[in-house]
Image (cartoon, rainbow, N blue to C red):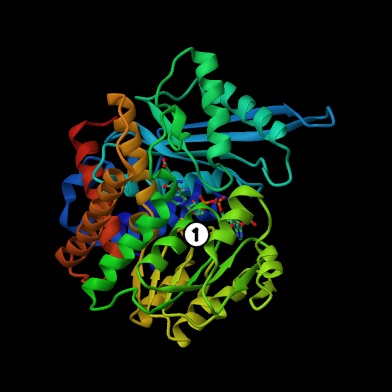
Amino acid sequence: MALQNKYLADLLETVKKRNQGEPEFIQAVTEVFTSLEPVAEKRPDLIEAGVFERIVEPERQIIFRVPWVDDNGVTQVNRGFRIEFNSAIGPYKGGLRLHPSVYIGIIKFLGFEQIFKNSLTTLPMGGGKGGSDFDPKGKSDGEVMRFCQSFMTELCKHIGPNTDVPAGDIGTGAREIGYMFGQYKRLRNEFTGVLTGKGLTFGGSLARTEATGYGVCYFANEMLKANGKSFEGQTVVISGSGNVAIYATQKATELGAKVVALSDSNGYIYDENGIDLALVKQLKEVERKRIKEYVTVHPEAKYTEGCSGIWTIPCDIALPCATQNEIDGESAETLAKNGCYALVEGSNMPSTPEAIDVYFENNMLYGPAKAANAGGVAVSGLEMSQNSERLSWTFEDVDSRLHNIMKEIFKSCDEAAKEYGMEGNYMAGANIAGFLKVAEAMKAQGCV
Ligand code: NDP
Ligand code: 2IT
């Protein structure tokens, strides 16, 4: 649907012209602007302060060469990125994605979303994102280490515990963060909380590993409760089988649901008895194997090649936890037709605009990524606090803070949606609530 507000419509045209060849970034801006139309009408002061123009332009974009030598002695070159998008409410904060599909448009959409997500957490964190087109799959530990060291050799010039604090994302887990932290410490000769998601022996926070997946379910639980439903006895389909998917599976199961499917970029497994999570953890976290290996231990489960087929499995609740645009209009129609009434996003921007239209047309409960998956970065914020005070909190303490933050995020989305006349539209609520805090800070700080 075209934007009604002329000011935002014109600005979107400028964004499209200025960011050609970056469809994911334009998709993210379009969605946010659509939600912000009533804000633009109500707040001419923010237009006058140039907040909308400034918020769509990153404060700084860093692109660099990442040379490293593979196990055969051959030089490899990747491209590294760090987009420092917005520092109005705190140091730039956001993950590093290592995946062959990475290019500037992906990092910019992620960095843009991160501004609003971080604002929703209530913690003082600005928005940033980075990564590389390096593919950790099939690389030896030595190759991954040499890549991470080379990547950090340049990145360390731009980040710092009060400037920009990266973390994990697709392809960047505990191993990669460890190598990058080691290199930062060596180059700068300082031990600081410059990265989050660190190992527990060197400044990491308990419950960071679990945080995003748990947070998705805490958010979903609030949304379900507010609409007279719960996870109890529900059938759940989760895509992906990485960090977010694994801990979403764990929490959804603890909350009484049966998770029947998981996937990776090759295909999906369907286990009608409920996923054997201990096996998935062993396969994915320890052995770094493909999800299809699941059926060698559980031959009664079924493996199917291809990703999108996972959305044809009938379920009550769907939690996409793999990657962007993994659910298109057709998959959304199939979900709705099969009785799925709630969809909560663990991955960033997993739904195409057509899919989102289908959720609303079918009155599905829709929990948008920037609210629902904010638990990961929220606990990253708590890791920064623990690093600053040189203390570590218990698992229970961090988990209960995470739980409260997710409840508050749901409340903010719900209330903002109501205030702007869109009750039940948590996407609009998330965009408005996340935006307003950053916008006020940008206005107060003047034209910078
Ligand atoms: P992981 O690398 O741990 O896992 C990613 C999973 O998604 C894997 O199963 C992977 O399969 C699958 N996947 C990745 N790319 C594709 C693709 N192009 N097509 C199909 N499947 C794909 O990453 P995370 O679990 O950390 O991240 C998953 C999502 O959650 C991402 O969108 C990320 O941005 C988001 N997120 C992550 C947070 C975190 O704290 N880690 C916080 C908030 C959001 P395969 O192994 O075959 O590549
Ligand atoms: O998308 C995200 O919020 C993340 N990948 C986590 C970022 C962080 O800084 O913990």
- Whether 384 is drawn above or below 273: the answer is above
**Is ligand 1 closer than 8 angstroms to the Cβ of mark 1?**
yes
Question: What residue sits 54% from the left and 31% below the top?
Answer: 178
Residue closer to the observer: 54 or 223: 223
Quarter holding residue 41? bottom left
Q: Residue 364: x, y in percent?
A: 35, 78
Q: Residue 150: x, y in percent?
A: 64, 25
Q: Quadrant of ligand 1?
A: bottom right
Q: Is residue 427 visible?
A: no
Q: Is residue 15 visible?
A: yes
Which residue position is annotated with label 1?
245
Question: What residue sits 35% from the left and 50% below the top?
Answer: 375
Q: Is residue 114 left or right of residue 73?
A: left
Image quadrant in which the C terminus is located: top left
Q: Is residue 210 left or right of residue 119?
A: right
Q: Residue 315: x, y in percent?
A: 46, 80
